[in-house]
């Protein structure tokens, strides 16, 4: 993530916090507890499902985290060689993760019974720092045996930001918007090797991840 992007994120967070401190507390209903279920689609051909809880200090600032799971849904490369290949079930990287994060909300504009405003959620994704995959040994076009290889290396910590628009109607709400992250979904696979081949040669170069998210929330 370049310096200009990081400075923009800091400016957005500062503006939201500053606005929150000056806003009236009676703009919309308030509760300290917020749960949400989130779904994301990314430019790395992956999806994410996540459940979160945040304690809201006031209408606009909350802290908490969640647990989630991401997986690549489209194979963009395949590790293979003379007489071997990675098992198809293991050729789509995935991981479980914990994600501590902040919730930053702007004051809302009320349209009838719906409150609409801006929303940002910066966080840190902490994945499981271990990956194990199955290698099929192939002889005469059929699988003749299996080997298992693993690694404890690769990226396990990444930063991401979600920013967009939220809408609340009473205790229920949703938010939708844009996400960006420095997560490399093939990071652990690049550390694997078999039969003299490093798996990094089979998979795409690390891209900057971006995408879209949708969150359904409830305050209680």
Image: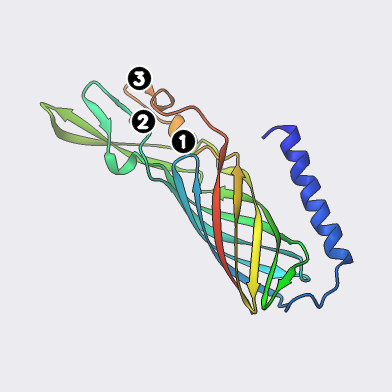
According to the image, label 3 marks what residue? 196
Which tag, 2 or 3, sits closer to the chain's start? Answer: 2
Helix, strand or loop at label 1? It is loop
> Measuring 75% from the left and 68% from the top, which residue is drawn there?
109
What is the C-alpha distance between the residues marked 2 and 3?
18 Å
> Measuring 61% from the left and 44% from the top, which residue is drawn there?
180
Query: 169 or 148: nearer the eye?
Result: 169
- State the quadrant of the C terminus: bottom right
Residue 120 image offset from top left, x and y in percent: 69, 55
| Callout 1 touching callout 2 (CB < 8 Å) | yes
According to the image, label 1 marks what residue? 186
What is the C-alpha distance between the residues marked 3 and 1?
19 Å
> Measuring 76% from the left and 62% from the top, which residue is drawn there?
106
Query: 21 or 158: nearer the eye?
Result: 21
Helix, strand or loop at label 2? It is loop
Name of the residue lying farthest toward the right: 22
Relative placement, left or right, of 138 versus 158 is: left
In the picture, the disc for residue 77 is 2
Query: 213 or 183: nearer the eye?
Result: 213
Query: Can see residue 191?
Result: no
Residue 211, compared with residue 191, is above or below; it is: below
Residue 95 image offset from top left, x and y in percent: 46, 48
Which tag, 1 or 2, sits closer to the chain's start? Answer: 2
């Amino acid at each position: 993530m370049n310096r200009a992007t990081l400075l923009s994120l800091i400016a957005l967070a500062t503006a939201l916090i500053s606005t929150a401190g000056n806003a009236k507390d009676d703009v919309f209903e308030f509760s300290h507890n917020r749960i949400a279920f989130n779904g994301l689609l990314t430019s790395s051909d992956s999806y994410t499902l996540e459940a979160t809880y945040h304690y809201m200090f006031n209408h606009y600032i909350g802290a908490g985290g969640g647990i989630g799971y991401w997986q690549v849904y489209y194979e963009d490369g395949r590790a293979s060689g003379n007489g071997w290949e990675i098992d198809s079930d293991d050729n789509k990287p995935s991981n479980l993760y914990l994600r501590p994060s902040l919730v930053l909300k702007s004051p809302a504009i009320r349209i009838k019974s719906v409150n609409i405003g801006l929303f940002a959620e910066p966080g840190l994704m902490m994945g499981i720092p271990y990956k194990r995959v199955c290698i099929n040994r192939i002889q005469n076009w059929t699988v003749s045996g299996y080997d298992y290889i693993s690694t404890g290396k690769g990226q396990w910590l990444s930063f991401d930001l979600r920013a967009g628009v939220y809408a609340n109607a009473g205790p229920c709400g949703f938010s939708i918007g844009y996400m960006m992250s420095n997560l490399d979904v093939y990071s652990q696979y690049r550390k694997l090797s078999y039969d003299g081949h490093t798996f990094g040669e089979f998979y795409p170069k690390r891209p900057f991840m971006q995408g879209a998210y949708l969150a359904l929330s409830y305050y209680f």
